[in-house]
Image: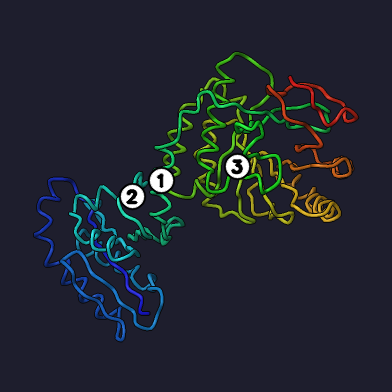
Amino acid sequence: MAASICLRISLNLSDEKMAKLDALGPAVAKMTGAFLESRWPWPKTFSVDSAFCFTLHDPKATVVDVIAVESLAEELQLRLFGTSDSGEVTLLLLDADQTNTDEFKRMSHAEIRDAFKAPIKAPPLEGRLMAINSKSGSPNGMQWQDLSQERRTHANLAQAPETGALNVEWRGIYFAPRQFFIGSAAAPIRASGAAEFSLVDGADRLPGDHAESFDMNVLQASLRRLEAGPFTGVLYLPICFSSLMRKSARDFYEQLLQTLPASRRSQLAACVYDVPRAPSFWALSQTRDLLTSHFSSIDLQVEDPGFEIESLPPGSVASVTFRLPAGEERSRLNAIRQFMKQREVFKRHNIWPAITNVATSAELRLCLMERAPFLTGRAVCGPLLQPVGGRPCGIEALPFKVAA
C-alpha cells in the first residue's frame, strides 16, 4: 500500500499579520510546489489541497521519508522572512486516518497555529504529528508525537477522581554505611489494602501507562505529609522519564511541581524512573532543568546492570538506582555484582550507586558485601504507615517492619 501523509504549512504570525495571510498564499504555493517537484521526484507524487496544504504520496514505500521534507522548512523560512525574527515557518506532517486528515485540512490558519503550539495541551486530532521548522536539527526536532496517546492521557487526567483522601504506604530508603534510613517513598494503596504501583519493587509494579496519575497521586500524598508538620528525612517523589520527553506531559509536570513548597525543597528528592540505558545529553539536561528548582537531589532508576554511567556528566545526578530484575535468585545476585563492578566509575563521576527491589536476605548480604550504599526493597523495609526518614537501624534489624 502506498504511503501518504498530509503536509500543512503553519506561519507563526501575530493576529494582525494572520489576517493578511491569504495574500501570501500564492507565493507559498508556488515555492512549495517548485520545491516538491525538484525534491520529491517521480514516482513520488503530491497533490495540492490548498495554498498551505499538500498531500504527499510515495507508491514504493509504506512510510513517507520525512527527512526529504526537512529542508523545505528552512527554504520557506528564508524566502518569506529572511533571517529576521518576524515570523517562523513550521511544517506540520500528520499521519492519520481519513477522517482526522480531512479535519486537519479544514482547520483555519489560526486554529492550526494555536492547536499545535508546543507544548500541545489537548490535541484536537488523533494520529501522529511531526513539526519541522528551521530549528528542527535540534535534538527535540524530527520526532513523531503520538496525538492519540496525548488525547488519552489528558482525558484520563481530566476524569481522574479527587485523590485528597487516597491512602498510601511508605517504604524506607536505607543508607548502609551509616545504618539509618535517610528517607521514604510512597505508594498508593488500593481498596484491597495492597499497593498498586511501587518504585522499590520489581518492574512489574511500575505504573506503565498510568505513570502520570501515579506520579500525581504520590505527589499529593507527599504534600499532605508536608502540610501535616515537620519530620526528619527526605521524601522521594516519582517522575516518569519517558513522560517528560513528551511535550504535553512535560507541561503537566511543570504545573504539578509548582504546587511543591520551595521552603521544603531540602526534604524533597526526585526519583526518575523508566530511564533508558544511555539517556542523551539533551534529554538529561531537560530533565535537570525542570527538576532542580523543586528537588534537592535527583535519582535515576535503571533496569540495566550495564547502565552507562560514563554517559552521565560528573555530578549531573545524585545517584543511579539499579532495579533488580525478575528471575531466580542466582541471576539477581549476578546482576548485583555486574552493577557494582562500576563502583570506581561511580566514584569518578561523583554519583552514588544504589540498588532497589532487594527481596531476600542473600541479596541484602551481597549488596552489603559489594558496598552498595543505598538500598530499598522488601528485605530492607516493609510497608509503613508513616515516613521513616532519619531513623537509625542496625543491619541485623533489617527488614524494618514496625510502623513509624
Q: Secondary structure at mark 1?
A: helix
Relative placement, left or right, of 200 versus 96 is: right
Mark 3 and mark 2 in contact? Answer it, CB < 8 Å. Answer: no
Q: Amino acid at mark 3?
A: Val
Residue shown at 21% from the left, 75% from the top: 47
Q: Which residue is mark 1?
A: 248
Circles 3, 1 touching at the beta carbon (< 8 Å): no
- Which quarter of the rendering shows the C terminus? top right
Q: Is there a contact, CB below 8 Å, between mark 1 and mark 2?
A: yes
- x%, y% of residue 284? 56, 48
The local secondary structure at tag 2 comes to: loop
Q: Is residue 339 left or right of residue 197?
A: right
Q: Residues within 10 Å of mark 1 (few under 14, many from 20)?
A: many
Q: CA distance from mark 1 to mark 2?
A: 9 Å
Q: Residue furthest bottom?
A: 43
The residue at the point 75 percent across, 37 percent down is 376
- Mark 3 or mark 2, which has the lower sequence index? 2
Estimate the x, y position of residue 15 in percent, counting from the top left: 15, 45
Q: Residue at x 72, y 47 (%)?
A: 322
Report the mark closest to the observer, 3 or 2: 2
Q: Is residue 143 left or right of residue 297?
A: left
Which residue is identified by label 3? 272
Amino acid type at circle 1 is Ser
The image's mark for residue 174 is none
Question: Mark 2 — residue?
Answer: 123
- Helix, strand or loop at label 3? It is strand
Lateral position of residue 224 relative to residue 122, left or right: right
Q: CA distance from mark 3 to mark 1?
A: 18 Å
Type of amino acid under label 2: Pro
